Amino acid sequence: MRFSTDSGFKTIRQAICIAETLFRCVCAYKDGEAIIDTAAGVLGKYDPRPVQPDSLFPVFSVTKGITAGMIHWLVDNGQLNLEENVATIWPAFRSNGKDVIKVHHVLNHTSGLHNAMGGIAQEDPLLMLDWDGCLNRICQSIPETEPGKEQFYHYLSFGWLCGGIIEHASGKKFQEILEEAIVRPLHIEGELYVGIPPGVESRLAALTVDTAELSKISALANRADLPSTFQPQQIAQLATTLPVAFNTLNVRRAIIPAANGHVSARALARYYAALADGGKIPPPHSSASKPVLGSHPHIPKLSSSQKPPIKNRKCIGRRTQATSPSVSTTNSYEKVSSHEDFDANEGRNTNSESSSGGDDSSSRIGNNLRTHVARKVYKNPRIIDEFLGTGEYENLALPGESFGLGFKRFSSKDGSSIAFGHSGMGGSTGFCDVTNNFSVAVTLNKMSFGGVTGKIVQLVCSELNIPVPDDFLRFAVEQSGPDEQLSMGRPIIN
């Protein structure tokens, strides 16, 4: 772990070691450089192996910020328009009065489909593992409110709504766009997944629950900004079953773009470091963090006896040019995002197996540390406004609400900085402060609902003299007594 001052080093170490029973990774970037990269604890209650920088944590709704970034990438590349009707892109979505729902309604949590799929865990738990089945169920759903009029957190439906848009707009599979838009350009192969591939199981952190905080959540009053199926009582019930379900491999391998991200803290912090700087890709992560970030093959090679059966699934999109490898494209970002072109620009040669583990990844990353050429994930110079639903995008987001276009807007008491990101149930979070070119990621596998995360974020920000977002500052203050509800009734759950 590296920090700017000796006192800062000690402060962050204290934050990481708040309790021996909590297991976490923390990474932070400032001005494009990784300044904190540390891990503590073990992988799980029954897994005594130590947490490492490349450990993969289930981060629940933190995944939404990654999925939103994919939507914005398609917009940036001219394959999608924020004001386009979803049904124009995805014809099967048109039924039951959904023909007026636009892409920005989905990103802004104002589509009216906030309760869609809400009962899936009770009605048909196996459906959640069926990607096409979930997309079909979304197509059959009925809006509860007029699109664009009320903002309710789309805690589960957000992922499949965005996933259907992504696949039908691009003509490619969700995970192909994830790799093309985010994983390969940022060189975070093997450390950011929505649905894990076989071969990464040894790096998985296992979930457990902080029962003391869980009891506090169940006592909270209902919240007006949450759907009727996702109130504190339901959240408390979910929290008792989620660790069991999300520790299983069949759930971990499912594509659930609202809730099933498996990431390392350093990959997540790097993602938000790029977003903080308008999409500019930071220099390679420090080689002092072992194993080197990006050195894992994203799709591990398995022996023939280990290979799972191949399932053929076609996704027919309206942009047919994106589906045919024989058709050339002028998409400049697509060119930048391939390993072959990246390495050619750096004066190196690789083969076509680079994305599946065929190249010498450690050597490649080492060379990248010496010769970094600045590139951008997004070309739009107003991409921050696009994320936040501000400026020329102000009419696409509901005024005065907490969500912009796919990201939670974070405010601070003094109002001196622009910050956004996304947290998840259990306390994991990733966000960036644009004003201070800062990003931080905290990943937990003991679901603590904000207390530990808030203290860590507060300590990191205070050491750097960066405003602490209100979402986290409230957790840094000791509660006034036993009757005080958990952090003013707003635990970190979204």
Image (cartoon, grey):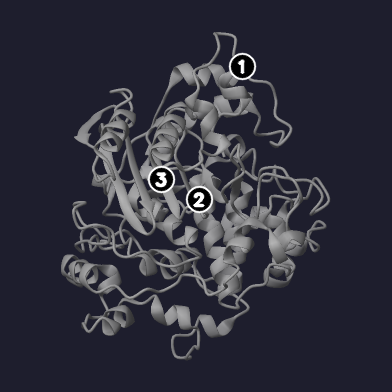
Amino acid identity at mark 2: Asp
Indicate the secondary structure of the residue bearing disc 3: strand
Position above or below: 323 against 447: below
Q: Which of the two residues, 477 or 157, is positioned nearer the viewer here?
A: 477
Q: Is residue 484 above or below residue 416?
A: above
Determine the secondary structure under disc 2.
strand
Identify the residue shown where x is 66% and y is 43%.
Answer: 153
Mark 1 vs mark 2: in front: 2
For disc 3, the marked residue is 441
Q: Mark 2 Cα within 10 Å, few/some/many (few <14, many 20+)? A: many
- Judging by the rendered image, the residue that carries numbered circle 2 is 433
Precedes in sequence: disc 1 or disc 2: 1
Quadrant containing the N terminus in the rendered view: top left
Q: Residue furthest top?
A: 482
Q: Disc 1 marks which amino acid?
A: Ala
Which comes before the other along the chain, label 1 or label 3? Answer: 1
Q: Nearer the N terminus, badge 2 or badge 3?
A: 2
On the picture, is 245 further left or further right than 229? left
Give the distance between the C-alpha atoms of the residues marked 2 and 3, in whole angstroms: 12 Å
Mark 3 neighbour density, 10 Å: few (under 14) some (14–19) many (20 or more): many
Could you tell me which residue is drawn at 22 percent across and 80 percent down? 350
Residue 31 in which image quadrant: bottom left
Q: Secondary structure at mark 1?
A: loop
Is 132 displayed left or right of 33 in the figure? Answer: right
> In the rendered image, which quarter is residue 411 located in?
top right
Residue lying at 44% horizontally and 43% vertically, measured from the top left: 59
- The image's mark for residue 219 is 1
Residue 8's x, y, as percent?
Answer: 30, 37
